[in-house]
Amino acid sequence: MPDAAPKMPSKTELRREDLRTRLIDIAEARIRAEGLSAIKARDLAKQADCAVGAIYNVFPDLNGLVMAVNGRTFQTLGEVVAASVAAAPQGKPQEELITMSLAYLRFAAENTNLWCALFDLEMSTEMDVPQWYLAELGKLFALIAAPLARLFPDDSRHDIEMMTRTLFSSVHGIVLLGLQRRISGVPMNKIEEMIAILLSNVTSHSKNT
Amino acid sequence: MPDAAPKMPSKTELRREDLRTRLIDIAEARIRAEGLSAIKARDLAKQADCAVGAIYNVFPDLNGLVMAVNGRTFQTLGEVVAASVAAAPQGKPQEELITMSLAYLRFAAENTNLWCALFDLEMSTEMDVPQWYLAELGKLFALIAAPLARLFPDDSRHDIEMMTRTLFSSVHGIVLLGLQRRISGVPMNKIEEMIAILLSNVTSHSKNT
DNA sequence: ACCTTGATTGAACGAGGTTCAGATTAGCCC
DNA sequence: GGGCTAATCTGAACCTCGTTCAATCAAGGT
């Protein structure tokens, strides 16, 4: 017998994996184009050229599929933010924070539906937050904490952690409400201005508590 | 004939109005207890002791009913925030802002499901934002703008407006993410601390742009 | 070739929002 | 009060979805 543990990728396994990625691709495209509510089992099956039931061989349910899409989205988001700060040489900490925030805004604006799906699901079901989610969030937080630690070298790890969460939540809130009311004005550059106001104020003064 | 314009509240009208408020009451209680997803047409009808179809005589659809609940919620929220600042004699502007923000947090924490419903609906359907919604939001903004105007008397109306939106969105973001991860720690007093960090920093420095 | 095991299928189930033809009732004039 | 008209009320029926499962089929081993 051959080695047992790293199971052979038998023909079945391959089809399985193929279907899996095909479904994720289709779901991602659909969410991007029409939003989370456009995810319908029968539509997906038709597009993927498989039976409805086949979806449930590969994912526990449609939520699981959306989670897989969210995994991709979250990873891309992390890369985009990291890339933005890597691109700006080694600016002042404040500028790094603003750069990252604008990258976050930009990503959310250009991929609104995918970005919304990231939260629409976690929010509604308050069950087990998956591991990768927390891991990705941790990576984002680390990116923010770095310039903050340089900016406030005397603050404790705890203080930096608090500031990180505070700033992330704040920027997230600005982006969220900013994009939400696409109708009622608040053009993109106003949102950018708001982020700049927030960060330049917060980071030009130091002591908290 | 009697005057025509302010139509008589005939027996039908009364029942109609009665059913309307009864349905809102029931829906409000259900959302409070079990969240937005617990709103089921058949359940509501059974509890209100009417036929399923009757709901649609009084509201365009279930969304409309939820909107009515949201109307109440939003109004209560406004009152709570206004009351909090009225209760604190005439403190410094910074303290007013913190007081209001903590009142906002407190309301969201104590009425999480109702508060979530406020955004879960507006978010998903991006159709016409109803008039009362913008009006209530305007009232909230006015409450925030008042202390800001005292704090930065030289800033233009536009600057104050921007700062108002910025702070509101930021606090909203902190509350949102804070309450979202009820599981993964972030106890209430940490959230309060985050709000305090944000506001004390922002409002102790002045110039933007 | 044959058997066993697991994947695949799609019709069927159940849950939920919404509708509508018929039954019921209110309002009104005699 | 009796009768007529128009509106309201009713709940069975319709439709859309997610999800399941008995029956079918294919892969891999012997």
Image (cartoon, coloured by chain):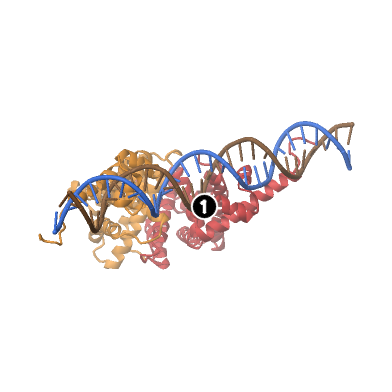
Chain colours: A orange, B red, C brown, D blue
Question: Does B178 appear above or below C18?
Answer: below
Please report the residue visible at 40 percent of the width from the left and 62 percent of the height from the top. B196
Q: Outermost residue, left direction?
A: A2
Mark 1 belongs to which amino acid?
Leu
Which image quarter is the C terminus of chain A in? Answer: bottom left
Give the quarter of the figure containing the N terminus of chain A: bottom left
Q: Tell me which residue sits at (41%, 57%) in the image.
A: A125
Q: Position of residue B6 (x, y in %)?
A: 73, 39
Please name whichever residue, B131 or B39, is drawn nearer the observer in this view of the structure: B39
Q: Quadrant of residue B82?
A: bottom right
When asked about the image quadrant of residue B124, the answer is top left
Instruction: Examine the rendering and report whether any part of residue A200 can be seen.
Output: no
Chain ID at mark 1: B
Of A111 and A38, nearer the camera is A38
In which quadrant of the rendered view does residue D2 lie? top right
Residue corresponding to mark 1:
B143
Q: Position of residue A37 (x, y in %)?
A: 41, 44
- Using residue B91 as the reference point, say whether residue B205 is left or right of it: left
x, y (%) of residue A41? 37, 45
Q: Is residue B22 visible?
A: yes
Q: Secondary structure at mark 1?
A: helix
